[in-house]
Image: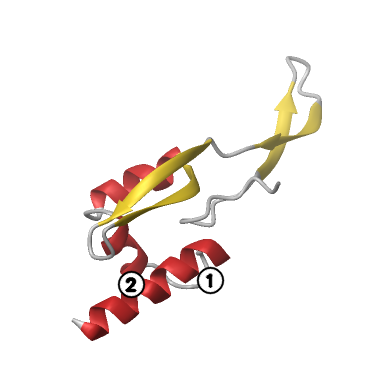
Amino acid sequence: MSRICELTGKGRQVGHNVSHANNKTKRVFLPNLQNVTLMSEKLERSFKFRVSTHGLRSVEHNGGLDNWLLKTSDDKLSANALKVKRELVKAQAAA
């Protein structure tokens, strides 16, 4: 399973371990991913996502899952999140 946040698209970063002698070896920085269940207020159901802790804070800051999905561009979202976004847009158009 790839280590990518489903809501922000945040993935691994590459850098160096630097020794005291200033020797550099490649290393990988992985995002802190958590399995969470987020509630959609407009759809009145919950969805499971694999989200970074940074992404989770961003969702809460923007006022919940519905607001986050409507504001975020499609290229950052996973296929699962895109399905939820499409359902949300349909529900908003019907209301």
Q: Nearer the N terminus, badge 2 or badge 1?
A: 1
The residue at which mark 1 appears reads as: 75
Q: Secondary structure at mark 2?
A: helix
Question: Percent position (x, y) of residue 54?
Answer: 42, 42
Q: Amino acid at mark 1?
A: Asp
Q: Residue furthest bottom?
A: 93
Instruction: From the viewer's side, name the closer residue of 68 and 31.
Output: 68
Label 2 or label 1, whichever lies nearer to me, is 2
Q: Residue furthest left?
A: 95
Question: Percent position (x, y) of residue 76?
Answer: 51, 65
The residue at which mark 2 appears reads as: 88
Mark 2 → mark 1, Cα distance in angstroms = 17 Å
Vertical placement of residue 39 versus 86, above or below? above
Instruction: From the viewer's side, name the closer residue of 54 and 83.
Output: 83
Q: Amino acid at mark 2?
A: Leu
* Residue shown at the point (48%, 49%) measured from the top left: 49
Q: Secondary structure at mark 1?
A: loop
The answer to whether any part of residue 78 appears in the image is no
Badge 2 density bin: few <14, some 14–19, many ≥20, Cα 10 Å: many
Q: What quarter of the picture does the C terminus occupy?
A: bottom left
Badge 1 density bin: few <14, some 14–19, many ≥20, Cα 10 Å: few
* Residue shown at the point (40%, 44%) measured from the top left: 37
Residue 33 horizontal side relative to residue 64, left or right:
right
